[in-house]
Amino acid sequence: MVDSLYYQALYSRLVPTKKGKRVFAPLMLKRLQKLGIDKTDPNELSPEEINRFARLDVDAATITWNRVLDVNDRFLRKITIGQNPTEQGHERVTGFDIAVASEVMAVLALATSLEDMQTRLGKMVVATSKRGDPITADDIGVSGALAVLMKDAIKPNLMQTLEVSGCGLHTKVSSNGLDSPRVRRSLFTPVLLPTSPMETHPSLLTGSP
């Protein structure tokens, strides 16, 4: 009974009444669809459905997202967090990854547009619930924030080769086997680079800014 009241209160905060009306956000509708709940009116959900919707029930031992650093420090690959008394016993083993080895970078290398990148980011599994269900970035509501952080990173860089010609470069080949520069070149370079040497900007030939 206490749990039911708790999730009812949490649900009221997640889907508050505004101007006499309650409406699900787009991410919430995606979560409902994932849970197999075919309802779009927040007032129609049963107590059991509210419990499933509002409760992620994350199994802390299954969290797959590590913190990242742009430095490779072997001593940080496995650490224990939550030892401070203020964390109230929420102690677990985690670690740091190097930034280019994160799944976010793999998504960045394969995304064909900002919208596609947000969709891919939202499908990343970050943990598993105690019931064994996968929990995604969309479930915790961070896919939009991730896309905003990466919105400039998806743009390719215009660089000059040793042969004094322009080239588009984006991300790099990593240990996961993704030939991301080739992907980027095929998608973006025809749009950004001149189609003939005569159209090349003078700065590429002279080296001037």
Image: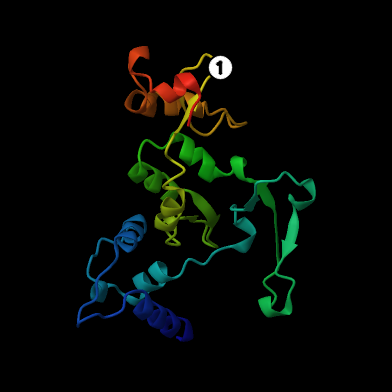
**Quarter of image, res 98:** top right
Q: Quadrant of the N terminus?
A: bottom left
Q: Position of residue 151 (x, y in %)?
A: 41, 47
Query: 59 and 85: which one is in front?
Result: 85
- Taking the image as shown, residue 70 lies to the left or right of residue 15, namely right
Q: Position of residue 28 (x, y in %)?
A: 33, 63
Q: Compared with residue 113, is residue 37 higher up or lower down, i.e. above or below?
A: below
* Residue corresponding to mark 1: 162
**Quarter of image, res 192:** top left
Q: Compared with residue 106, is residue 28 higher up or lower down, i.e. above or below?
A: below
- Crowdedness near tag 1: few (<14), some (14–19) or many (≥20) residues, C-alpha within 10 Å: few
Q: Position of residue 51 (x, y in %)?
A: 41, 73
At horizontal 53% and vertical 41% (from top left) the residue drawn is 105
State the residue lying farthest toward the left: 20
Badge 1 amino acid: Leu
Q: Compared with residue 80, is residue 5 higher up or lower down, i.e. above or below?
A: below
At horizontal 28% and vertical 72% (from top left) the residue drawn is 45
Query: 44 and 205: which one is in front?
Result: 205
- Taking the image as shown, residue 114 lies to the left or right of residue 159, namely left
**Quarter of image, res 195:** top left
